[in-house]
Image (spheres, grey):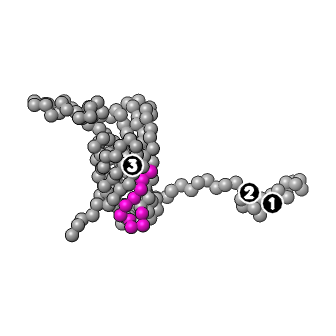
Amino acid sequence: MHAWARGLAALLATRPGLTAQEATPVAEDVSRIGHPLLGAWQWTNLSATSSDPAIGVFYPDGTYLTYESFEGVGIGFWRATGERTDGLVVTYQTLAGAWQSVLGPVEMFEPGYVPTGQLLEIDPLITLTLHITLDETLRSYLAIGQNVVRNELGDIVWTDSAIGKAEKMVEEG
Protein backbone atom coordinates (compact mmCIF):
# COMPACT_ATOMS: atom_id res chain seq x y z
CA MET A 1 0.00 0.00 0.00
CA HIS A 2 1.31 3.44 -0.92
CA ALA A 3 2.00 5.92 1.85
CA TRP A 4 -0.74 8.28 0.59
CA ALA A 5 -3.31 5.46 0.70
CA ARG A 6 -2.30 4.56 4.28
CA GLY A 7 -2.58 8.23 5.24
CA LEU A 8 -6.04 8.51 3.65
CA ALA A 9 -7.20 5.33 5.40
CA ALA A 10 -5.93 6.66 8.73
CA LEU A 11 -7.68 9.99 8.15
CA LEU A 12 -10.96 8.30 7.25
CA ALA A 13 -10.76 6.11 10.34
CA THR A 14 -10.54 9.18 12.56
CA ARG A 15 -13.23 11.19 10.73
CA PRO A 16 -16.55 9.30 10.74
CA GLY A 17 -18.14 12.08 8.68
CA LEU A 18 -15.92 11.12 5.76
CA THR A 19 -16.78 7.44 5.74
CA ALA A 20 -19.61 5.87 3.78
CA GLN A 21 -23.06 6.64 5.12
CA GLU A 22 -25.12 3.80 6.52
CA ALA A 23 -28.36 3.00 4.73
CA THR A 24 -31.56 4.54 6.09
CA PRO A 25 -32.79 2.19 8.79
CA VAL A 26 -35.84 0.15 7.87
CA ALA A 27 -38.79 0.51 10.24
CA GLU A 28 -39.17 -2.56 12.38
CA ASP A 29 -42.49 -4.02 13.38
CA VAL A 30 -43.51 -3.31 16.96
CA SER A 31 -46.13 -5.36 18.79
CA ARG A 32 -49.69 -4.22 18.14
CA ILE A 33 -50.86 -5.61 21.49
CA GLY A 34 -52.08 -2.65 23.54
CA HIS A 35 -50.91 -0.15 20.92
CA PRO A 36 -52.70 3.22 21.26
CA LEU A 37 -53.78 3.15 17.60
CA LEU A 38 -56.21 0.27 18.26
CA GLY A 39 -59.87 1.21 17.98
CA ALA A 40 -62.08 3.57 15.99
CA TRP A 41 -60.93 6.93 14.62
CA GLN A 42 -62.71 9.75 12.80
CA TRP A 43 -60.51 10.79 9.91
CA THR A 44 -60.55 14.14 8.12
CA ASN A 45 -58.78 14.41 4.79
CA LEU A 46 -56.74 17.60 4.62
CA SER A 47 -55.69 17.07 0.99
CA ALA A 48 -56.98 19.46 -1.64
CA THR A 49 -58.79 16.65 -3.48
CA SER A 50 -61.31 15.79 -0.80
CA SER A 51 -62.36 16.73 2.70
CA ASP A 52 -64.93 14.04 3.36
CA PRO A 53 -64.76 12.68 6.89
CA ALA A 54 -64.37 8.94 7.34
CA ILE A 55 -64.44 6.39 10.12
CA GLY A 56 -61.58 3.88 10.33
CA VAL A 57 -61.04 0.98 12.71
CA PHE A 58 -57.62 -0.48 13.57
CA TYR A 59 -57.83 -4.11 14.76
CA PRO A 60 -55.23 -5.96 16.89
CA ASP A 61 -54.56 -8.52 14.12
CA GLY A 62 -53.33 -5.72 11.85
CA THR A 63 -56.43 -5.35 9.71
CA TYR A 64 -58.00 -1.98 9.04
CA LEU A 65 -61.50 -1.16 7.81
CA THR A 66 -62.78 2.25 6.77
CA TYR A 67 -65.57 3.96 4.89
CA GLU A 68 -65.29 7.30 3.11
CA SER A 69 -68.12 8.65 0.97
CA PHE A 70 -66.02 9.40 -2.14
CA GLU A 71 -63.57 6.50 -2.14
CA GLY A 72 -65.90 3.88 -0.69
CA VAL A 73 -64.99 0.94 1.53
CA GLY A 74 -61.31 0.57 2.34
CA ILE A 75 -59.73 -2.63 3.58
CA GLY A 76 -56.12 -2.61 4.61
CA PHE A 77 -53.34 -3.59 6.92
CA TRP A 78 -51.43 -1.58 9.49
CA ARG A 79 -48.26 -2.13 11.45
CA ALA A 80 -46.81 -0.42 14.46
CA THR A 81 -43.34 0.94 13.73
CA GLY A 82 -42.82 2.60 17.11
CA GLU A 83 -44.64 3.61 20.25
CA ARG A 84 -46.39 6.45 18.41
CA THR A 85 -45.69 5.68 14.74
CA ASP A 86 -47.45 3.36 12.34
CA GLY A 87 -47.73 2.44 8.69
CA LEU A 88 -51.03 1.85 6.89
CA VAL A 89 -51.89 0.58 3.41
CA VAL A 90 -55.56 0.66 2.34
CA THR A 91 -57.21 -0.44 -0.89
CA TYR A 92 -60.62 1.01 -1.70
CA GLN A 93 -63.54 -0.50 -3.58
CA THR A 94 -66.23 1.82 -4.91
CA LEU A 95 -69.81 1.00 -5.80
CA ALA A 96 -70.21 0.42 -9.52
CA GLY A 97 -71.29 3.65 -11.15
CA ALA A 98 -70.25 5.86 -8.25
CA TRP A 99 -67.53 7.51 -10.33
CA GLN A 100 -69.86 8.33 -13.20
CA SER A 101 -72.23 10.54 -11.22
CA VAL A 102 -72.18 12.83 -8.23
CA LEU A 103 -75.36 11.03 -7.20
CA GLY A 104 -73.69 7.62 -7.35
CA PRO A 105 -75.34 4.53 -8.81
CA VAL A 106 -78.85 6.01 -9.08
CA GLU A 107 -80.22 2.96 -10.89
CA MET A 108 -80.05 1.09 -7.57
CA PHE A 109 -82.89 3.29 -6.30
CA GLU A 110 -85.22 2.81 -9.26
CA PRO A 111 -88.43 0.85 -8.60
CA GLY A 112 -87.95 -2.74 -9.69
CA TYR A 113 -84.13 -2.60 -9.61
CA VAL A 114 -82.67 -6.11 -9.60
CA PRO A 115 -78.98 -6.58 -8.75
CA THR A 116 -77.17 -8.38 -11.54
CA GLY A 117 -74.04 -9.45 -9.75
CA GLN A 118 -70.89 -7.68 -8.60
CA LEU A 119 -71.72 -4.18 -7.38
CA LEU A 120 -68.14 -3.22 -6.51
CA GLU A 121 -65.77 -1.95 -9.15
CA ILE A 122 -62.18 -3.04 -9.49
CA ASP A 123 -61.49 -0.19 -11.88
CA PRO A 124 -60.29 2.21 -10.71
CA LEU A 125 -58.36 0.65 -7.87
CA ILE A 126 -57.35 3.21 -5.22
CA THR A 127 -54.50 2.48 -2.82
CA LEU A 128 -53.64 4.81 0.03
CA THR A 129 -50.29 4.43 1.80
CA LEU A 130 -49.82 6.46 4.99
CA HIS A 131 -47.24 7.07 7.69
CA ILE A 132 -49.03 7.85 10.96
CA THR A 133 -47.71 9.76 13.95
CA LEU A 134 -49.79 9.89 17.12
CA ASP A 135 -49.55 13.04 19.22
CA GLU A 136 -48.46 13.01 22.87
CA THR A 137 -52.05 12.56 24.12
CA LEU A 138 -52.46 9.40 21.99
CA ARG A 139 -55.93 10.72 21.08
CA SER A 140 -55.14 12.22 17.66
CA TYR A 141 -52.77 11.56 14.80
CA LEU A 142 -51.40 13.12 11.66
CA ALA A 143 -51.04 10.92 8.58
CA ILE A 144 -48.97 11.74 5.50
CA GLY A 145 -48.68 9.61 2.40
CA GLN A 146 -49.85 9.03 -1.15
CA ASN A 147 -52.97 8.05 -3.09
CA VAL A 148 -52.38 5.91 -6.17
CA VAL A 149 -55.13 5.08 -8.70
CA ARG A 150 -54.59 2.18 -11.10
CA ASN A 151 -56.62 0.99 -14.07
CA GLU A 152 -57.69 -2.60 -14.74
CA LEU A 153 -54.24 -3.38 -16.21
CA GLY A 154 -52.50 -2.17 -13.06
CA ASP A 155 -51.11 0.96 -14.73
CA ILE A 156 -50.90 4.05 -12.55
CA VAL A 157 -53.33 6.61 -13.95
CA TRP A 158 -53.22 9.18 -11.13
CA THR A 159 -51.28 9.95 -7.95
CA ASP A 160 -51.62 12.60 -5.32
CA SER A 161 -50.14 13.31 -1.94
CA ALA A 162 -52.38 12.60 1.02
CA ILE A 163 -52.50 14.28 4.39
CA GLY A 164 -55.08 13.92 7.08
CA LYS A 165 -55.74 13.99 10.76
CA ALA A 166 -57.84 11.79 12.99
CA GLU A 167 -59.37 11.89 16.44
CA LYS A 168 -59.93 8.75 18.49
CA MET A 169 -63.56 7.91 19.07
CA VAL A 170 -64.18 7.14 22.74
CA GLU A 171 -67.22 6.25 24.75
CA GLU A 172 -68.67 9.05 26.81
CA GLY A 173 -69.84 8.42 30.29
Residue lying farthest left? 112
Q: Which sits earlier in the primary sequence, circle 2 or circle 1?
A: 1
Residue lying farthest bottom? 173
Q: Quadrant of residue 8?
A: bottom right
On the picture, is 20 further left or further right than 26?
right
Rendering coords of residue 104 (x, y %): 24, 35
Whole-angstrom CA distance, mark 2 to mark 1, is: 9 Å
Magenta highlight range: 135-144
Point 31% across, 46% down: residue: 52
Look at the numbered discs 1 and 3 and tell me whether their residues touch, using CB distance below 8 Å. Answer: no
Q: Quadrant of residue 141?
A: bottom left
Q: Is residue 143 found inside the magenta-colored segment of the image?
A: yes
Q: Is residue 3 above or below residue 122?
A: below
Point 31% across, 57% down: residue: 41
Circle 2 residue = 18
157 and 161: which one is in front? 161
Whole-angstrom CA distance, mark 3 to mark 2, is: 41 Å
Look at the numbered discs 2 and 1 and tell me whether their residues touch, using CB distance below 8 Å. Answer: yes
Label 3: element kind: loop
Circle 1 residue = 11
Q: Say which amino acid is labelled 1.
A: Leu
Rendering coords of residue 65 (x, y %): 30, 50
Q: Say which amino acid is labelled 2.
A: Leu
Label 2: element kind: helix
Point 61% across, 53% down: residue: 23
